[in-house]
Amino acid sequence: MTDVMRGHRTLPHTADLIVEAWGDDFTACAEEAAAAMLEICVAGGPADHATVVRVAADGTRPLLAAILDEVVYLLDISELVPVDVRLTELPGGVVEMRFGLGARRSVRLTGAAPKAVVMLEAPDERRTGPFRCRFIVDV
């Protein structure tokens, strides 16, 4: 059995943050990137609601951008805050995102919600792994 190599980290950037994420495949890398986005402003809490969102794009760079844009959108729009996320890759360049949601009053907010993402390095769809990405989060 192989150990799964995945993770993420944040680095300081002038008035923003840089996120680096990695995984054995595209889905693991993208899930780590999405999880890092959540950790920037939410320190967990009970997930007593859920929502499923599907995003699609042609290629890994636009697909990762669509995934991260969805995280930014969900963090900004409602009284339900995403506290965790799981990704499943579906056929045809589609990713299903399952978010655990908690009431805004029940979660511990640790920072401002991200406003935008600027991609610095995206996974290359021609690779079979490992995948890495790097992006700036405008908070």
Image (cartoon, helix red, strand yellow):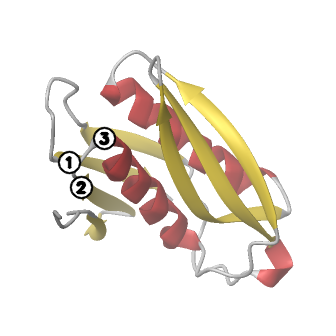
Label 1: few (<14), some (14–19) or many (≥20) C-alpha neighbours in 10 Å: many
What amino acid type is highlighted by mark number 2?
Answer: Trp
Label 1 – label 2 distance at C-alpha: 4 Å
Please report the residue visible at 57 percent of the width from the left and 29 percent of the height from the top: 55
Residue linked to disc 1: 132
Q: Earlier in the sequence, mark 1 or mark 3?
A: 3
The count of marks equals 3
- Local secondary structure at mark 1: strand
The disc placed on residue 115 is none
In the displayed structure, 52 sits above or below 20; it is above
Label 2: few (<14), some (14–19) or many (≥20) C-alpha neighbours in 10 Å: many
Question: Which of 3/125 is in front?
Answer: 3
Label 3: few (<14), some (14–19) or many (≥20) C-alpha neighbours in 10 Å: many
What amino acid type is highlighted by mark number 3?
Answer: Phe
Horizontal arrangement in the rendering, residue 138 relative to residue 81 (left or right): left
Please report the residue visible at 40 percent of the width from the left and 36 percent of the height from the top: 64
Residue linked to disc 3: 26
- Local secondary structure at mark 2: strand
Residue linked to disc 2: 22
In the displayed structure, 28 sits above or below 56; it is below
What amino acid type is highlighted by mark number 1?
Answer: Arg
Question: Which of 18/9 is in front?
Answer: 9
Horizontal arrangement in the rendering, residue 29 relative to residue 49 (left or right): left
Q: Earlier in the sequence, mark 1 or mark 2?
A: 2
Measured as percent of width and height from the top left, residue 18 is found at 30, 59
Label 3 – label 2 distance at C-alpha: 9 Å
State if disc 2 and disc 1 touch (CB < 8 Å): yes
